[in-house]
Amino acid sequence: IPAIAADAQDLPLRAGCADAVAVGFGVRNLADLRRGLAEARRVLKPGGRLLVLDFFRDDPAAAGAGRGAARPLRRGLDLALPLAGRLLGRDRAAYAYLAASRDRFVTPAEFAALLGEFGFRDILMRRQTFGIAHLIGGASRPPTEGRPMERERIPQPRSRSPGPAPAAWSTACAWWRCCWRRGATWRCCAATPSSRRRRPSWAARRAR
């Protein structure tokens, strides 16, 4: 298997080519988590699995597999990792950021919900090392027939105003109807009264 270095948010791979996507302690560092999940979903074959092992933000109200580590253990880890990085790797800063990045990340339950939002099924969640880390994953659903996965098809956390639609003309609609494409759907706005006026014929325009 050839090794390549690439942006996880813009993989140089064709859609539906991977049997599995496995990420260890990397998803937490993505600049855009949603874009990274969309790319993983795009390159997976139908039924392919995504598996993510990472540190997640603690949720004190969580129970079962979503429960994090006990507070004393988590606090000890926050102190021990930078010290280990300084003694073993001579790079304290490389490990000191872990606690801050973990506390800015999503909880295990929030990440599992995101996977469902991006079309993953059979979501699994397992506590690792007394809840210090979690293994979360799911299987890719087959894309809807006639609607292939695209890089632009990224679910958003909340609805946003679409803004002004780009003006375009469609041969499928009459000449006075303004149409634009949003996703895979063509939309046409209603004609204004002034635009409904009948166009003068070519002969009438020549006579002017």
Image: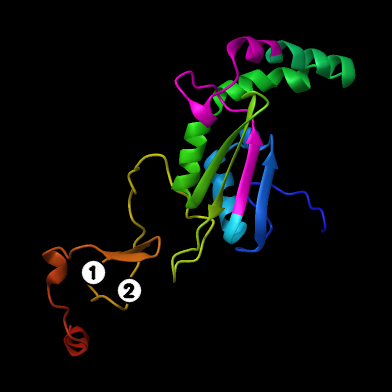
Magenta residue span: 49-76
The residue wearing badge 1 is 177
Measuring 54% from the left and 31% from the top, which residue is drawn there?
A: 65
Quadrant in which the N terminus is drawn: bottom right
Q: Is residue 106 visible?
A: no
Most extreme residue toward the bottom is 203
Residue 94 vertical position relative to residue 197 in the rendered view, above or below: above
The image position of residue 102, as x and y in percent, is 61, 24
Measuring 66% from the left and 50% from the top, which residue is drawn there?
A: 21
> Relative to the observer, which residue lies in front, 152 or 157?
157
User: Dot 1, how many residues are within 10 Å of its Cα: few (below 14), some (14-19), or many (20+)?
Assistant: many
Q: Are marks 1 and 2 in contact (CB under 8 Å)?
A: yes
Measuring 65% from the left and 63% from the top, which residue is drawn there?
A: 17
User: Dot 2, how many residues are within 10 Å of its Cα: few (below 14), some (14-19), or many (20+)?
Assistant: some
The image position of residue 160, as x and y in percent, is 35, 43
The image position of residue 125, as x and y in percent, is 56, 38
> Relative to the observer, which residue lies in front, 42 or 31?
42
The image position of residue 26, as x and y in percent, is 68, 37
Report whether 83 appears left or right of 19.
right
Q: Circle 2 sits in a helix, a strand or a loop, which is it?
A: loop
Report whether 149 appears left or right of 97.
left
The residue wearing badge 2 is 170
